[in-house]
Amino acid sequence: MSSESYDVVVVGAGPAGLMAAGAAGAAGARVLLLEKNPEPGRKLLISGGGRCNFTNAETDMHRLVSRYDTAGKALFSPFARMGPAQVLEFFSSLGMPYKIEDNKRAFPRSDKSSSVLQVLLHYIEKGNVKLRTRTTVRGLHHDSGRVQGLHLNDHDINAESIVVATGGLARPDTGSTGDGFSWLEQVGHSIVRPEPSLVPVVVAEDWVSDLQGLAFADIRISLRLGDKTVSKTDGKVLFTHFGLSGPGILNLATRMSQAAAEARRIGGPAPSICLNFFPSLDGGSLDRRLQDELNAFPRRLLRTILESMLPPRLARRVLVEALASTGTSNEITASEVPKQLRKRIVTLMQDFRLTYRELQSEDWAVVSSGGVPTDEVDFRSMESKRIAGLFVCGDMLNINRPSGGYSLQICWATGYVAGLSAAAAAAAARNASGG
Ligand SMILES: Cc1cc2nc3c(=O)[nH]c(=O)nc-3n(C[C@H](O)[C@H](O)[C@H](O)COP(=O)(O)OP(=O)(O)OC[C@H]3O[C@@H](n4cnc5c(N)ncnc54)[C@H](O)[C@@H]3O)c2cc1C
């Protein structure tokens, strides 16, 4: 039925698939890379706001793997072969200078994700990889516990090894529609249901849309369930028309949805997201700072003074909240501010509360949780433990991670190991059959 045959076929030309195809090609395999979009790397191009935080330059291996929760242990092996140091070396040796920003986040010096894609396209070209776009894979063909090839719409392709790199379920508009999960389920893998993971959150307060577009570089975010603080982090926060986004919020999103589930279970109120816009000051210092401002400009409107301490739209919201149910006019001047009101404002600047409603959908997610359980894959080779000749990499794996370059680091390491192992397995199969 098939007229085509390859050593290695890689499905999905995202970062993991491109790396896998390039590595297999460099190892001498005849490689076909299939992509259903008209062009490769669509999600890679929008990564990091178009700048692509392509790895995290954490060199301490124990600290690095600790960022990946319980799955971290499995990553020791692929990271030993393609850890952050090797990733930086890989990209710079192929002509992409880079820079390291705060929290060890690595970016191309051009600030363009297209520079990262260029390197990968060059890498697959060097390895003589055949890239075929606008080609949707429909499923795997296997026999006696070994992959044999795959099905396209109009014909089949034979392959000694297949690397599935079809991504997770976040941002399906980029092509990551979870196709590979059903194929793997059919060959005996148990797929953990993918959920949006690094994802913005929707809040209950409608007025949040008035704050849309406000961004804060490093504020403290606390998640509170009743009187209890269940999680706390410092990070960037962005107000959107529906709620909150930015790395600090994305990193807490899963914890927020767990807290909401807990609140529902015990019949309590929804969790609060509390923002401290002055994390480096204690309450007393902030109060003194506000007091100094009020004393220095007694005839100024309180609103004007707050607008000098906070972005004007946020200052106005703080004032609305502070004056709520006091009957005080918002035209109040600095000299008229009673102590109680001043204290209330200080509290709002350091404990500004929003009510969690839900996670945004996967259309907004940076990554999804879930996927292929790590114990069903041999991380020394990235080969499936269910079926021989099948390799899995990138976002398909069930590995939680924070934002900061940790996702793409998984793609490079697991893609690289999958590509090399797929090439070696194909060579071994060819030798065994005398081919
Ligand atoms: C907005 C945004 C910003 C991000 N920023 C960062 C960042 O700065 N740093 C970071 O580390 N991570 C970031 N990420 C996450 C990172 O982009 C992903 O972890 C990474 O792209 C996953 O790579 P992948 O190759 O596993 O899958 P994908 O990039 O999802 O690629 C899978 C490919 O497979 C193709 N495909 C799917 N099904 C089929 C099929 N049936 N046949 C043929 N082809 C198929 C798809 O079209 C797609 O091209 C970001 C994600 C988003 C959405």
Image: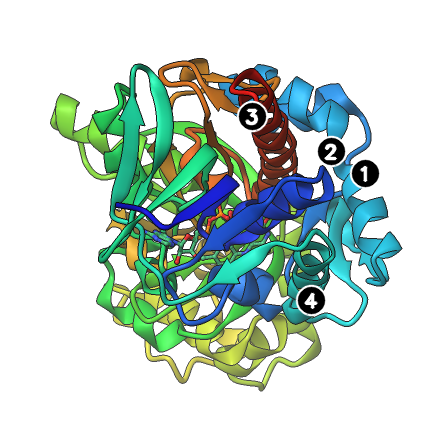
Compute the Cα span from label 1 to label 2. Answer: 5 Å
CB-based contact (under 8 Å), mark 3 and mark 1: no
Q: Earlier in the sequence, mark 1 or mark 4?
A: 1
- Residue at 32% x, 47% y: name it: 2
Q: Secondary structure at mark 4?
A: helix
Residue that carries the numbered disc 2 in the rendered image: 82
Q: Earlier in the sequence, mark 3 or mark 1?
A: 1
Given residues 308 and 7, the one toward you in this image is: 7
The three-letter amino acid code for the residue at tag 3 is Arg
CB-based contact (under 8 Å), mark 1 and mark 2: yes
- Residue at 51% x, 77% y: name it: 302
CB-based contact (under 8 Å), mark 1 and mark 4: no
Q: Quadrant of residue 173?
A: bottom left
Residue that carries the numbered disc 3 in the rendered image: 430
- Residue at 50% x, 52% y: name it: 33
- Residue at 74% x, 33% y: name it: 83
The three-letter amino acid code for the residue at tag 4 is Gln
Residue that carries the numbered disc 1 in the rendered image: 86
Task: Kindly report which numbered mark, 1 or 4, lies closer to the viewer in this rendering.
Answer: 4
Given residues 338 and 261, the one toward you in this image is: 261
Q: Is residue 297 above or below residue 238?
A: below
Query: Which residue sits furthest front?
Result: 434
Q: Secondary structure at mark 1?
A: helix
CB-based contact (under 8 Å), mark 3 and mark 4: no
Task: Kindly report which numbered mark, 2 or 3, lies closer to the viewer in this rendering.
Answer: 3
Q: Is residue 192 visible?
A: no
Compute the Cα span from label 3 to label 1. Answer: 30 Å
Residue that carries the numbered disc 4 in the rendered image: 118
